[in-house]
Image: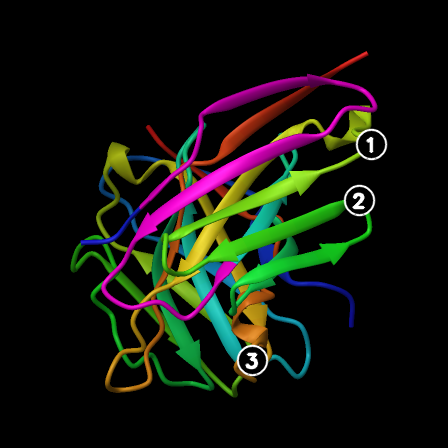
């Protein structure tokens, strides 16, 4: 089957650095992406990794290790507005008939304290 | 136009009634996705359209759920004989279809469905 694991909650203070981990088990693997969702809002795309290594986008970075089936989202210089839920998602096996199957993790709720 | 739009934003219906949810993707996005999110939970993938075609419908929770897309644009998700367990926020997303773009999905604001 397919499963993704993330910590349910993380708390940090403004200005700090926080890392949100994601481990996955899928029948195939075509990439790992991260989304942010504020309470009552829609998910918004943050980053994606198809290859091993670190991708940096401003204060946010995402890392992938395919051999370890593991990735993480790194948030630097935390701000109050970063308080939200963060989801990792994988594009699972590419179906024979060109279907797609995306699996989202359960989400990590980040609380940034003053 | 702007982003992905969905209607209605809220829908309250009685158990056993049919409901239809609408999604209008970003112009030019040929890939369209439907997800379901229960309160405090992650996103459950329902179905994907490439153009007007949905190659695989196995993600739909039951045969009461169906979806269609016409003209490569607007999509509707229909739930027949609604049950209380169908209560959730139904999210629609769209993307381009280059290999990397599948991961960059743009989500609509969702339709909050409540079955009483």
Q: Position of residue A82 (x, y in %)?
A: 74, 32
**Do discs 3 and 2 belong to a common subunit?**
no
Residue at 57%, 76% in the rendered image = B100
Q: Is residue B25 magenta?
A: no
Can the viewer see residue B76?
yes
Left or right of A53, for residue A2: left
Can the viewer see residue B106?
no
Tag of residue A59: 2
Residue B38 falls in which quadrant of the image?
Answer: top left
Residue A31 lies, with reference to residue A22, above or below; the image says below
**Do discs 1 and 3 belong to a common subunit?**
no
Tag of residue B23: none
Tag of residue B73: 3
Residue at 54%, 83% in the rendered image = B97
Residue A26 falls in which quadrant of the image?
Answer: bottom left
Q: Is the C-beta separation of discs 2 and 1 under 8 Å?
A: yes
Residue at 56%, 84% in the rendered image = B98
Which span of residues is magenta-colored? A4-32
Left or right of B61, for residue A52: right
Task: Quote the CA–CA distance across marks 2 and 1.
Answer: 7 Å
Q: Position of residue A61 (x, y in %)?
A: 69, 49
Residue neighbourhood size for the residue with mark 3, other residues' Cα within 10 Å, grouped as few (<14), some (14–19), many (≥20):
some
Task: Quote the CA–CA distance across marks 1 and 3.
Answer: 40 Å
Asked which colour scheme the image uses, the reply is rainbow
Q: Position of residue A95 (x, y in %)?
A: 26, 79
Element carrying mark 1:
loop
Question: Split into 4 quadrants, where in the image is the C terminus of chain B?
Answer: top left
Element carrying mark 3:
loop
Q: Position of residue B54 (x, y in %)?
A: 33, 79
Left or right of B38, for residue A83: right
């Amino acid at each position: 089957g397919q499963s993704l694991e993330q910590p349910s909650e993380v708390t940090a203070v403004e200005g700090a650095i926080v890392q949100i981990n994601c481990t996955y088990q899928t029948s195939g693997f075509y990439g790992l992406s991260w989304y942010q969702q504020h309470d009552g809002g829609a998910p918004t795309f943050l980053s994606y990794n198809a290859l091993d290594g670190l991708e940096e986008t401003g204060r946010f970075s995402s890392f992938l290790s395919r051999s370890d089936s593991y990735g993480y989202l790194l948030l630097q210089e935390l701000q109050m507005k970063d308080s939200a839920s963060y989801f990792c998602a994988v594009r699972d096996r590419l179906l024979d008939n060109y279907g797609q199957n995306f699996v989202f993790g359960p989400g990590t709720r980040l609380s940034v304290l003053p | 136009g702007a982003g992905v739009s969905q209607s209605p934003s809220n829908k309250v219906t009685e158990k056993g009634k049919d409901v239809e949810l609408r999604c209008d993707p970003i112009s030019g996005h040929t890939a369209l996705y439907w997800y379901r999110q229960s309160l405090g939970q992650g996103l459950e993938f329902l179905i994907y359209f490439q153009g007007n075609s949905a190659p695989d419908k196995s993600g739909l929770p039951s045969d009461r759920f169906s979806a269609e897309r016409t003209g490569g644009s607007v999509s509707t998700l229909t739930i027949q004989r609604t049950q209380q367990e169908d209560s959730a926020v139904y999210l629609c997303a769209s993307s381009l279809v280059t290999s990397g773009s599948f991961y960059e999905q743009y989500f609509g604001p969702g339709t909050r469905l409540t079955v009483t």
